[in-house]
Amino acid sequence: EAGVAQSPRYKIIEKRQSVAFWCNPISGHATLYWYQQILGQGPKLLIQFQNNGVVDDSQLPKDRFSAERLKGVDSTLKIQPAKLEDSAVYLCASSLAGTREGTQYFGPGTRLLVL
Amino acid sequence: SQQGEEDPQALSIQEGENATMNCSYKTSINNLQWYRQNSGRGLVHLILIRSNEREKHSGRLRVTLDTSKKSSSLLITASRAADTASYFCATYNAGNNRKLIWGLGTSLAVNP
């Protein structure tokens, strides 16, 4: 079974530029999550999708971050314009819907450096 | 928001020794999960313990859960250099939009 795919793996941009990350979850996983992980900290949930609907985006900085999952499968996360403090690893995860377990499966992440 | 708090924040041991890390949380849960993160394999699910379970084993891993104290511990026996990683606990409450609440992690270094 293929895991969660993410691209790119690394990205270096200058502040005020825009950047986009892509995620393809495990086949059949209806729930998709985007996390931001700053060095030395735990993952911080940015947005959670159930199919193509947003379940939770309470911690997404909506003035600069946006995400979509138009067909309920793959997803993109965009930052525009980027700030220095956005330097982090962006993790995508997926899980089965309808389960009471909540186990999440993570992609390798995209490491973003904003200069 | 972060709920789990792991301690210690960092742990350094010799190969072959046991490593114990703890996690405390604040609200009611359906289960508690431990994940490992290293540079090679990213963030990986290790073990899940349900709220009605007190202890669970998986290979060299032993997890305990005390819901009265809202705490859990992860024991890694006979540690290996490959166990060097950060370990995170995450709590799951199905009523909370089915999302995991993450701790800040324990950084484990196993020295050969």
Image (cartoon, coloured by chain):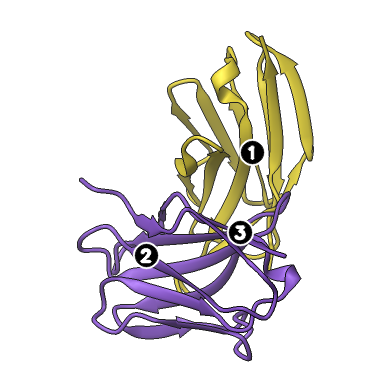
Picture layout, residue A99 above or below residue A41: below
Spatial distance from mark 2 to mark 1, Cα to Cα?
Answer: 23 Å
Q: Amino acid at mark 1?
A: Ser
Name the secondary structure under disc 3. loop
As drawn, the chain in purple is: A
Q: Which residue is mark 3?
A: A43
Q: Residue furthest bottom?
A: A63
Residue pictured at 53% horizontal, 43% vertical: B35
Name the secondary structure under disc 1. strand
> How dense is the environment of label 2, judged by Cα within 10 Å: few (below 14), some, or many (20 and up)?
many
As drawn, the chain in yellow is: B
Residue A12 lies in what quarter of the image? bottom right
Residue A30 at what x, y percent from top left?
28, 70
Q: Which residue is mark 1?
A: B86
Q: Look at the image and tell me in which quarter the N terminus of chain A lies.
A: top left
Q: Is residue A111 visible?
A: yes
Q: Chain of mark 3?
A: A
Q: Is residue B96 visible?
A: no
Residue B34 at what x, y percent from top left?
54, 43
Q: Amino acid at mark 3?
A: Pro
